[in-house]
């Protein structure tokens, strides 16, 4: 594809993302490329890269484009967003404007208004001192008090790290082989890959490498999983032969890691309210050679949970959350999250946690995890739960998982962030239910 055609496709994709505001951008992008199979791998990567740069710089691009007098009364179009992003990434303005040639496969010519608006960018940089911190660091204004509650005066460096490109992390599936075998095979196939520092089964690849088409992935020796997510499994630390409930299992990301730790022995029940997500688990479980998992779809008025009171050794609640910890990967999620979402999520998490807690046997373990940065969903949620449920307490340092790296050992609960740990943002609290007297 020519640079003009790539730009045209990127503009179309930004339009598609904008017109499905509740749908994750990667789902829209997958559908977009599925319908355009003629777009090859290299072009696809170039188009996605520009679109993701636009999503990551959304507030700053709007700030600049809105400043032009010609913007008054007009929406900021995907054409302008893509053009401005190309300019701020180093393409000279005249060259950017020339891409809008109106020729075959190229975007139509810039209007006079668009040209003037782009001219205004000359001499500016994407991030500028005049922008507020929330604009510079691409978070919604209403989130400021929530972030300050979590990070105090460290909001800026934490959110700065949230703007960086994430690595691609893999978890080696010990049911299929060893970490050194996976490392050797991947390197033999030409991938640049290192061992992760914190997860004992993790491998880290720089940037976007097409690992899903490699035999190592297809044969189930590795699974794509952020190192932080692997550490949630490490903190849960289930033992072979246990009965484990993964109450918000989704498409089984953590279930797979837990089954590995249980060496495929014992029983895992993976629940979720989403049929689509649970269906998504089937192929992954098969590829990973996991066969101790049964799935259960939770439905309204389900008596399933009631009938299983006190019957699991370990219950993991990987709660639905704001996803603020994954913003490096899903920059569009910043645009979708509202304060109302948080207000709805917090009581929902409390209810899910209370329901799941009833299924822990006396002496058993309850793990609460989120991929959120916010105290209201994390430590405060845990604190309120413990206050209302005196039969639970945080595990003692002796009881805490030994699979965790030294800096996290012996803690009943911990947070991870891109800034301090190089992982997605996560929170984990590990509790124990009192033995019956
Ligand atoms: C953070 S995601 C889980 C991710 C998954 N554990 C993984 O590692 O890939 C949260 C999940 O909670 C599910 N969920 C939402 N409401 C629920 C409820 N009331 N009970 C159980 N699961 C729920 C969502 O469908 C979603 O799949």
Image (cartoon, grey):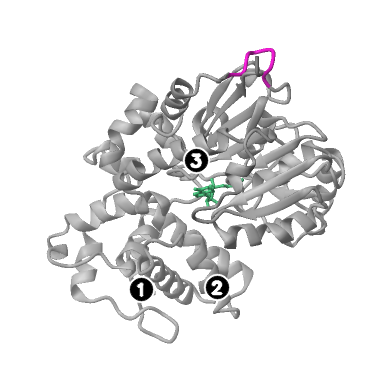
Q: Is residue 159 visible?
A: yes
Q: Is residue 423 above or below residue 90?
A: above
Question: Could you say whether the residue bearing mark 1 is in a helix, strand or loop?
Answer: helix
In the rendered structure, the answer to whether residue 213 lies left or right of residue 37 reads: right
22, above or below 153, in the image: below
Point out the stretch of residues depicted in magenta: 394-400
- Residue corresponding to mark 2: 33
Residue at 42% across, 42% down = 348
Observer-nearest of 3 and 81: 81
Task: Reply yes or no: does residue 395 show up in magenta.
Answer: yes
Pointer 1 residue: 98
Q: Position of residue 170 (x, y in %)?
A: 70, 45
> How many neighbours does mark 2 have within 10 angstroms: few (below 14), some (14-19), or many (20 or more)?
some
In-front residue for pair 100/270: 270
Residue ID at (26%, 51%): 123
At x 83%, y 52%, the residue is 289
Q: Which residue is mark 3?
A: 352
Label 1 vs label 3: CA separation?
55 Å
Q: Nearer the N terminus, badge 1 or badge 3? A: 1
Relative horizontal placement of residue 164, taking residue 141 as reference (left or right): right
Q: Decide: few, some or many residues near mark 1? Use Cα within 10 Å; few <14, some 14-19, many ≥20.
A: few
The answer to whether residue 154 is seen in the rendering is no
Q: Does label 3 point to a residue whose CB lies under 8 Å from ligand 1?
A: yes
């Amino acid at each position: 594809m020519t640079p003009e055609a790539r730009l045209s496709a990127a503009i179309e994709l930004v339009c598609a993302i904008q017109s499905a505001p509740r749908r994750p951008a990667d789902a829209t992008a997958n559908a977009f490329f599925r319908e355009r199979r003629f777009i090859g791998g290299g072009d696809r990567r170039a188009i996605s890269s520009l679109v993701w740069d636009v999503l990551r710089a959304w507030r700053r691009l709007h700030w600049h484009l809105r400043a032009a007098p010609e913007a008054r009364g007009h929406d900021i179009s995907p054409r302008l967003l893509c053009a401005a992003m190309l300019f701020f990434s180093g393409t000279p303005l005249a060259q950017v404007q020339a891409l809008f040639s109106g020729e075959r496969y190229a975007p139509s010519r810039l209007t006079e208004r668009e040209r003037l608006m782009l001219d205004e960018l000359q001499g500016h940089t994407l991030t500028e001192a005049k922008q507020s911190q929330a604009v510079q660091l691409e978070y919604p204004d209403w989130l400021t008090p929530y972030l300050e509650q979590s990070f105090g005066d460290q909001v800026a460096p934490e959110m700065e790290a949230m703007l960086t490109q994430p690595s691609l992390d893999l978890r080696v599936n010990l049911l299929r082989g060893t970490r050194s075998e996976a490392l050797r095979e991947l390197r033999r196939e030409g991938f640049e890959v290192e061992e992760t520092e914190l997860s004992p089964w993790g491998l880290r690849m720089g940037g976007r490498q097409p690992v899903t088409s490699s035999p190592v992935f297809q044969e189930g020796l590795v699974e794509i999983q952020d190192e932080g997510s692997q550490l949630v499994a490490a903190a849960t630390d289930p033992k072979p032969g246990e009965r484990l409930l993964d109450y918000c299992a989704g498409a089984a990301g953590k279930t797979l890691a837990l089954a590995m730790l249980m060496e495929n022995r014992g029983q895992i029940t993976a629940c979720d309210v989403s049929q689509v997500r649970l269906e998504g688990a089937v192929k992954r479980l098969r590829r990973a050679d996991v066969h101790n998992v049964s799935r259960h779809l939770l439905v309204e008025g389900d008596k399933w949970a009631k009938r299983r009171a006190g019957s699991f050794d370990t219950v993991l609640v990987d709660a639905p959350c704001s996803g603020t910890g994954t913003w490096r990967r899903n920059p569009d999620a910043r645009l979708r999250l509202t304060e109302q979402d948080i207000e709805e999520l917090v009581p929902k998490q409390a209810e899910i946690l209370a329901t799941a807690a009833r299924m822990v046997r006396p002496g058993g373990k309850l793990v609460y995890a989120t991929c959120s940065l916010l105290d209201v969903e994390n430590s405060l949620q845990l604190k309120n739960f413990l206050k209302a449920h005196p039969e639970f307490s945080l595990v003692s340092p002796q009881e805490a998982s030994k699979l965790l790296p030294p800096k996290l050992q012996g803690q009943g609960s911990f947070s991870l962030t891109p800034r301090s740990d190089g992982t997605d943002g996560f929170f984990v609290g590990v509790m124990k239910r009192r033995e019956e007297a």
